[in-house]
Image (spheres, rainbow, N blue to C red):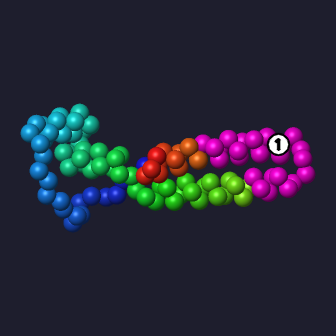
Amino acid sequence: MPRAHVNRESDRFMLRLPEGMRNRIRVAAEANNRSMNSEMVAALEEKYPSPGIDEAVCDAIRNIEVAIDGFRSSPPSVENAKIFTSLEANLEALRAIAKQLSPTG
């Protein structure tokens, strides 16, 4: 997943950390070979992913649904059946991903 570029001109946010957390972040940052700021941004990106991902998954779901509808109306063939089965499997996988990405789970 691409990350937004963070630099000195990016938004700033003052934060008070509980006792000992700064050291845990420092240890994790060193282990991951990055700055403490980058470590915290990575953790926040994981917890709060970009909403654009949800939109992309929904678009992919709609596109596959349209393709499946097209195959339903096409003449039956072994090749069409294979493609149809593949599309349905991918559709179910995308629906599962969309469910995981949704705020309600």
x 66%, y 58%: residue: 63
Mark 1 Cα shell of 10 Å, populated few (<14), some (14-19), many (≥20): some
Q: Residue furthest left?
A: 19
| Helix, strand or loop for disc 1 | helix
Q: Is residue 85 at all visible to an observer of this figure? A: yes
- Kindly indicate the quadrant of the structure image that contains residue 11: bottom left
Q: Is residue 26 magenta?
A: no
Q: Residue furthest bottom?
A: 9
| The residue stretch that appears in magenta | 68-93
Residue 97 rendering spot, x and y as whole percentages: 53, 45
Residue 66 vertical position relative to residue 83 in the rendered view, above or below: below
Q: Main secondary structure of the magenta part?
A: helix
| Horizontal arrangement in the rendering, residue 61 relative to residue 23 (left or right) | right
Q: Is residue 76 magenta?
A: yes
x 82%, y 42%: residue: 81
Which residue carries the number 1 mark?
A: 81
Total marks drawn? 1
- Kindly indicate the quadrant of the structure image that contains residue 59: bottom right
Between residue 30 and residue 20, name the one nearer to us: 20
Residue 61 rendering spot, x and y as whole percentages: 62, 54
Q: Is residue 2 at all visible to an observer of this figure? A: no
Q: Amino acid at mark 1?
A: Ala
Residue 62 rendering spot, x and y as whole percentages: 64, 58
x 46%, y 59%: residue: 52
Residue 74 rendering spot, x and y as whole percentages: 87, 54
